[in-house]
């Protein structure tokens, strides 16, 4: 709903052919209608970013942050009608990493089995990379936005920060987002296994 409302705020649809018209092509779940629609939205948001940077006095202080979060969200959002089993990995700066379906339920069936594979081998990287490549989980975090705490797409720096909190004693240098994503999938799988054993 937050993404849907933000998209509409940048619509500025005045006539047929207006670049902002693409921002009205979402249902409330804010899924792109097609890859072409996704690219139109990203292109429009890049133009909007220029407006904000050129006239910062006309916008809220956190407008760039919200705009960039929306672009990251829409870049990863599944196309309308797709059901590829994508799920959410929820991170926290205190170091917790959990996972759930997009509607907040526990993982089941093949998704659950594939996540468990991340803890079954001495080398977890292939299984974790399989999760990233095939499920494209959405990394989310609760962040303060305009004096309100909201559940939003996690930034690269937030993901790196959580990894440093979790694995501070290891030799890995967390500066690359792709590497952080692997470790966060592994952490989510480990937490999932621990939660199931506790039941």
Image: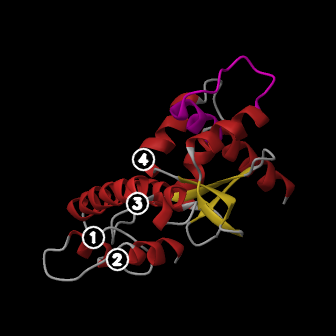
When asked about the image quadrant of residue 46, the answer is bottom left
Q: Nearer the viewer, residue 177 or 24?
A: 24
Rounded to the nearest angstrom, the CA distance separating label 3 from label 4 is 18 Å
Which of discs 4 and 1 lies nearer the camera? The answer is: 1
In the image, the segment drawn in magenta is 167-184
- Local SS, label 2: loop
Which of discs 1 and 3 lies nearer the camera? The answer is: 3
- If you read the primary sequence from the N terminus, does the residue marked by circle 2 or circle 3 appear first? 2
Q: Nearer the viewer, residue 122 or 11?
A: 11
Asked if labels 1 and 2 touch by Cβ distance under 8 angstroms, the answer is: yes
- Local SS, label 1: loop
Rounded to the nearest angstrom, the CA distance separating label 4 from label 2 is 24 Å
Mark 4, residue position: 134
Q: Quadrant of the C terminus?
A: bottom right
Mark 1, residue position: 33
- If you read the primary sequence from the N terminus, does the residue marked by circle 4 or circle 2 appear first? 2
Q: Residue at x 35, y 53 (%)?
A: 50
Q: Residues within 10 Å of mark 1 (few under 14, many from 20)?
A: some
């Amino acid at each position: 709903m937050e993404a849907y409302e933000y998209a509409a705020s940048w619509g500025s649809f005045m006539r047929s052919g207006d670049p902002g018209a693409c921002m009205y092509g979402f249902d409330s779940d804010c899924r792109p209608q097609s890859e072409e629609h996704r690219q139109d939205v990203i292109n429009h948001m890049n133009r909007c970013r220029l407006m904000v940077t050129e006239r910062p006095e006309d916008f809220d202080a956190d407008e760039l942050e919200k705009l960039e979060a929306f672009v990251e969200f829409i870049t990863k959002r599944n196309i309308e009608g797709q059901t590829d089993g994508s799920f959410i990995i929820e991170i926290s700066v205190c170091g917790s990493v959990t996972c759930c379906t997009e509607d907040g339920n526990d993982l089941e069936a093949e998704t659950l089995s594939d996540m468990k594979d991340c803890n079954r081998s001495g080398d977890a990287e292939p299984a974790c990379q399989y999760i990233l490549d095939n499920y494209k989980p959405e990394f989310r975090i609760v962040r303060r936005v305009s004096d309100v705490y909201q559940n939003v797409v996690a930034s690269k720096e937030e993901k790196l920060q959580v990894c440093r909190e979790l694995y501070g004693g290891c030799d890995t240098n967390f500066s690359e987002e792709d590497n952080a994503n692997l470790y966060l999938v592994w952490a989510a799988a480990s937490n999932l296994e621990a939660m199931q054993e506790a039941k």
